[in-house]
C-alpha cells in the first residue's frame, strides 16, 4: 500500500503529492511544523501542538486558515489511511506560493505519518553524551521560540554532535545562558530540585517540556525556571533532555565531563516512568 499524505485539502499518495515551486516555505523557510506522536492510534497532547502552531502562526504572520477541528480530522485521516497506531507525525504549514499581496496568499498544509521509531533502549539504560554547540542563539532573532521550517542551523548543530559521537548538542545564547538542544529542551537536577531555562530565554515551548513541568507540579517536585549557565550544567547531579519522541532522555556525559556519578539518576528515572505512564493513560483513554 502506498504511503498516503494529506496535502492542502485531501489525501493523496505520497508519490503524487506536489507543492508549488514558488512555495514560500520551500524558497524562504516561511513556515512552521509540529512533530507529534501517537500511541494506540491517539495523538498525544494534540491540543498543545495545535495551540503552539496557532500562536506561532499569529506571531510570525503565517497564514492560518484552518480551525482545530479541520486539522485534527486531517491528522487522523492520515493515521487511518496508513493503518498506523504508534506513529511519528509531522504537520507542516507554510505561507504557500509567493503572491503579490497578502490577500492572494494561500497556505500550504502537509500532514505525514510514519511508524514510530523510538530511540535505542541503551540510551535510556546507560544515558547519552551531549556536546556544547559551537554556535549561539541570538535572543533578538524573531524566529527563536517558534518551531519554524528554518531549521538548517539546528540540523548543522545536530550533525556536528553526531560527528563527535554525541546524541545532542546544547545551545547557549550569545550572552552565555543555557538555552536548549538542537531538537530538545533541557533539564538539570541539583539537590533534588528540577531546573530548566525559562521560555523567555527564548526556548521552544516544547510539548514534552510542558508535560514534565506538569508532572513535577503534580508530584510535588520543586521546579525552578531561571537563567542557567555552563557552571550549572557542570555542577548538576542529573541532566536530561525532552521531546515527544525521546520523552525523557538521560544525559550522563557533557563532552568529557561526567554528570553526577555517571549513571542515570533517580529523578530522571522517576520522570521517565511518569511520562510514559501519562502517554499511555491519555492515549488509551482517548481510544
Image (tube, rainbow, N blue to C red):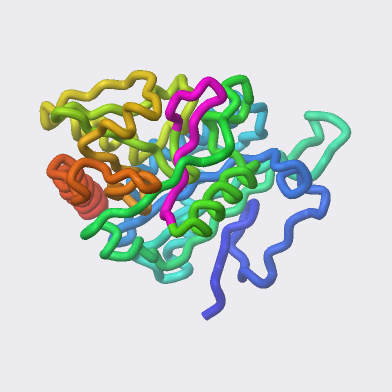
Q: Is residue 118 visible?
A: yes
Relative side of 159 to 198, left or right: right
x and y percentages locating residue 57 in the rendered image: 59, 31
The residue that appears at 49% across and 56% down in the rendered structure is 164
What's drawn in magenta, residue-wise? 166-179
Residue 223 versus residue 33: which sits nearer the camera?
A: 223
The residue that appears at 63% across and 53% down in the rendered structure is 9
Q: Residue furthest bottom?
A: 1
Q: Is residue 69 visible?
A: no
Q: Residue furthest right?
A: 100
x and y percentages locating residue 140 in the rendered image: 61, 20
x and y percentages locating residue 101 in the rendered image: 84, 30
Q: Is residue 41 above or below residue 187?
A: below
Quadrant housing the C terminus? bottom left
The residue that appears at 46% across and 70% down in the rendered structure is 82
- Residue 276 on the magenta span: no
Residue 209's quadrant in the figure? top left
Amino acid at each position: 500500500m502506498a504511503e498516503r499524505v494529506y496535502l492542502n485539502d485531501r489525501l493523496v499518495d505520497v508519490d503524487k503529492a506536489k507543492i508549488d515551486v514558488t512555495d514560500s516555505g520551500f524558497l524562504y523557510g516561511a513556515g512552521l511544523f509540529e512533530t507529534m506522536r501517537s500511541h494506540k492510534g491517539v495523538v498525544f497532547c494534540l491540543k498543545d501542538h495545535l495551540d503552539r502552531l496557532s500562536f506561532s502562526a499569529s506571531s510570525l504572520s503565517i497564514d492560518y486558515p484552518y480551525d482545530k477541528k479541520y486539522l485534527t480530522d486531517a491528522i487522523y485521516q492520515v493515521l487511518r489511511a496508513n493503518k498506523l497506531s504508534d506513529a511519528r507525525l509531522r504537520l507542516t504549514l507554510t505561507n504557500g506560493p509567493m503572491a503579490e499581496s497578502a490577500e492572494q496568499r494561500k497556505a500550504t498544509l502537509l500532514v505525514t505519518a510514519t511508524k514510530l521509531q523510538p530511540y535505542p533502549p541503551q540510551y535510556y539504560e546507560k544515558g547519552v553524551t551531549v556536546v556544547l554547540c559551537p554556535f549561539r542563539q541570538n535572543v533578538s532573532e524573531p524566529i527563536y521560540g517558534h518551531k519554524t521550517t528554518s531549521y538548517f542551523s539546528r540540523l548543522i548543530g545536530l550533525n556536528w554532535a553526531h560527528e563527535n559521537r554525541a546524541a545532542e548538542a546544547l545551545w547557549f545564547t550569545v550572552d552565555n545562558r543555557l538555552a536548549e538542544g538542537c531538537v530538545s529542551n533541557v533539564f538539570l537536577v541539583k539537590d533534588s530540585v528540577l531546573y530548566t531555562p525559562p521560555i523567555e530565554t527564548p526556548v521552544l515551548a516544547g510539548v514534552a517540556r510542558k508535560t514534565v513541568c506538569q508532572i513535577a507540579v503534580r508530584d510535588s517536585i520543586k521546579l525552578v525556571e531561571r537563567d542557567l549557565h555552563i557552571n550549572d550544567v557542570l555542577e548538576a547531579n542529573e541532566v536530561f533532555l525532552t521531546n515527544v519522541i525521546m520523552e525523557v532522555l538521560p544525559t550522563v556525559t557533557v563532552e568529557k565531563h561526567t554528570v553526577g556519578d555517571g549513571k542515570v539518576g533517580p529523578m530522571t528515572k522517576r520522570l521517565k516512568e511518569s511520562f510514559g505512564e501519562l502517554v499511555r493513560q491519555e492515549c488509551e483513554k482517548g481510544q
